[in-house]
Image (spheres, helix red, strand yellow):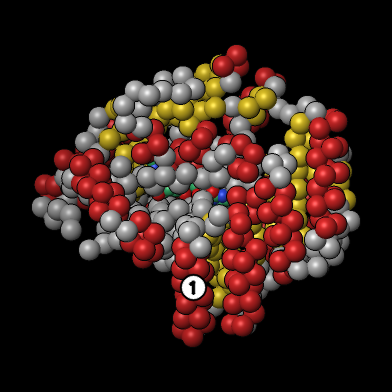
Amino acid sequence: MHSDDPSGSVAGVIEKLKARFADRCATSQALREQHGHTTTWLENQPPDAVVFAETTEEVAETVKICAAANVPVIPFGTGTSLEGHVNAPEGGISIDLSRMSSVLEVNSEDLDCRVEAGVTRKQLNSYIRDTGLFFPIDPGADASLGGMAATRASGTNAVRYGTMKDAVLALTVVTADGNIIRTGGRARKSSAGYDLTRLFVGSEGTLGVITELTLRLHGQPEAISGGVCPFPDVQSACQAVIMTIQMGLPVARIELLDSMQVRACNSYSKLDLAETPTLFLEFHGSEAGVNEQSETFSAIADEFGGGPFEWATAAEDRSKLWAARHDAYWSGRGLRPEAQVVATDVCVPISRLAECVTQTAADIEAEGLLAPIVGHVGDGNFHVQVLVDPDNPDEMKTCEAFIERLAIRALDMEGTCTGEHGVGQGKQKYMKREHGDALELMQSIKEALDPHNLMNPGKILPQS
Ligand SMILES: Cc1cc2nc3c(=O)[nH]c(=O)nc-3n(C[C@H](O)[C@H](O)[C@H](O)COP(=O)(O)OP(=O)(O)OC[C@H]3O[C@@H](n4cnc5c(N)ncnc54)[C@H](O)[C@@H]3O)c2cc1C
C-alpha cells in the first residue's frame, strides 16, 4: 500500500505536477480512463493523473516527485497492450510519452537510429523510407517504440527479423529513483558486463521508464513477393509451416488464419478467400530469390494437401492482404459485435506447433466458443481471440478455463504462456509454473531496482 500521508499523498503530488507542467498534467475523468486498460474486457483502472512529458529530464522530474511521496508511476505509450499493462490498480501517475516523438539520429552507414520513446513504428518507417532502410518489427497496432520495447513485442516479421529483443541496441532509462542511465552504445555486440538493455526490454514499465531507444535497422529488400495458400485443415497448414522452417526457407512472414478468422476477414476487409485454414506468406530477397522461395513453398504446401499458393508481386495486392491480416482483431470482433474480446497468445517450439494448434482448435469446438485463431506460426506463436459476454458468468468461466488450459498446454510443450503480448495483469498466474525458482530471482531484481514498488505496481510478478 502506498502513502496516505497528506504531505506525500497523490493530491499533493498532483498539485506539484500541475505547478510544474500546467495543463500537461491532466486529471479529467475521460483522459484518465483513456490511460487505463481499454483494449479488452479487463476492468479499466485509471490513474489519478496523466503527465504528458516532452523530455527525458521531465520524465525524471516526474518520477522524482512521485518517488518522494511514494506514489506509483505507470509509463504509457499508445495503450494498445492487451493484458491490462497500463492499468493503475493502486492509482498513481501515468507518464504519457507520446509527445516524445522525435527521431534523433539515423546512421544509415551503420544501419541504426536513435529515437524518443513515443515515436511509433509507422512514424519511424515513414521517416527513414528514403534511406533505403526499414524497421521490421510490426505488431499490427501502430504502437510506440518505447511500449514495444517494454513488452518485448514482435509480430508478423519476427520469423525473419527477430523481436524487440533483437532490435534494441541500447536504451536511455529513468530509473525508479529518477536517475537517468544509458544501457549501451551503438556497437552491434558487446561483452561489457550485465546486459541491462535486455533486462529493461520486456520489463513492462516495472523497472524504469524508457525515454530513448537505439534501434537496429535493415535494408529494404530488393524484391518482395507474397500471397495466400489454403489448406484442408489446421493440422496440414501447421505441418507445412514446420517443414518450411525446418528446411530453413527464409520466409519474412508466415501467418495462419483458421477458417473462422478467414470468414471474419472476408466480411470485414471485403476479401473473397475460401473459408478454410489459410497461410498468408511474404518472401523478401532478390527477384530470383523470392521466385525460388515461392516455388519451394508451393511444393511444400502441395505435399501437405494445400494450395494452390497464389502469389503476387504487385504491392497493392499484397497491401490489401496484409491490411486484412492486421485488421484480424477488429474483423474477429465483428463476428459478435456486442461481445468483448479476450485476446490471448502462447508460443511453442516449432515441432509442437501442429499439435498445440490442433488441440486448441478441438478445445474451442468442444466448448462451443466463438474464438478465431490467428498466428505468427513461423515462430510457433499463435493468438486466440475469444468473444464473450462479460456479464454472463457461465461464459466467462468457460473462457477463463479455456485460456488456462491453453497456457498450460503450451507450457507442457516446453513453450511459454505468452510469446509477445506480455504478462501485465492477465498472465501473472502462470509465472511460477513457467519460471519455477527463477521467479524469486525476478522478484529480487524488482526489489533491488524498485525497492518501494512504485514502477507500474501489480504487473508481471504475482502479488503475494
Ligand atoms: C489489434 C492489436 C494487435 C496486436 N498485435 C500484436 C502483435 O502482433 N504482436 C505484439 O507483440 N503485440 C501485439 N499487440 C499488443 C500491443 O500492440 C503491443 O504490446 C505493443 O508493444 C504495446 O505498445 P504501446 O505503445 O501501445 O504500449 P502501452 O500499451 O502503452 O504499454 C505497454 C506496457 O509497456 C509499458 N510502457 C509503455 N511505454 C513505456 C516506456 N516508454 N518505458 C517503459 N515502459 C513503457 C507500459 O507501462 C505497459 O506496461 C496488438 C494489440 C492490438 C490492439
Provide residue 341's location: percent of width, then percent of height: 56, 67
Residue 457 visible to an observer of this rendering: no
Residue, far bottom? 394
Image quadrant containing the C terminus: bottom left
Q: Residue at x 80, y 40 (%)?
A: 293
Provide residue 23's location: percent of width, then percent of height: 37, 39
Q: Residue at x 34, y 33 (%)?
A: 196
Left or right position of 362 against 450: right
Q: Residue at x 13, y 56 (%)?
A: 4
Residue 437 visible to an observer of this rendering: yes
Provide residue 413's location: percent of width, then percent of height: 51, 63
| Number of numbered markers | 1
Q: Residue at x 65, y 70 (%)?
A: 358
Give residue 445's quadrant in the image: top left
Q: Looking at numbered disc 1 in the image, what kind of residue is underneath it?
A: Arg
Image quadrant containing the N terminus: bottom left
From the viewer's perspective, is residue 222 above or below residue 366?
A: above
Give residue 324's quadrant in the image: bottom right
Left or right position of 245 against 56: right
Say which of 99 and 195 sits in front.
195
From the viewer's perspective, is residue 168 above or below residue 192?
A: below
Left or right position of 278 against 160: right
As helix, strand or loop, the secondary structure at mark 1 comes to helix
For disc 1, the neighbor class at 10 Å (few under 14, some 14 to 19, many from 20) is: some
Mark 1 residue CB less than 8 A from any atom of ligand 1: no
Provide residue 215's location: percent of width, then percent of height: 51, 28
From the viewer's perspective, is residue 280 above or below residue 95?
A: below
Give residue 88's quadrant in the image: bottom left
Identify residue for label 1: 405
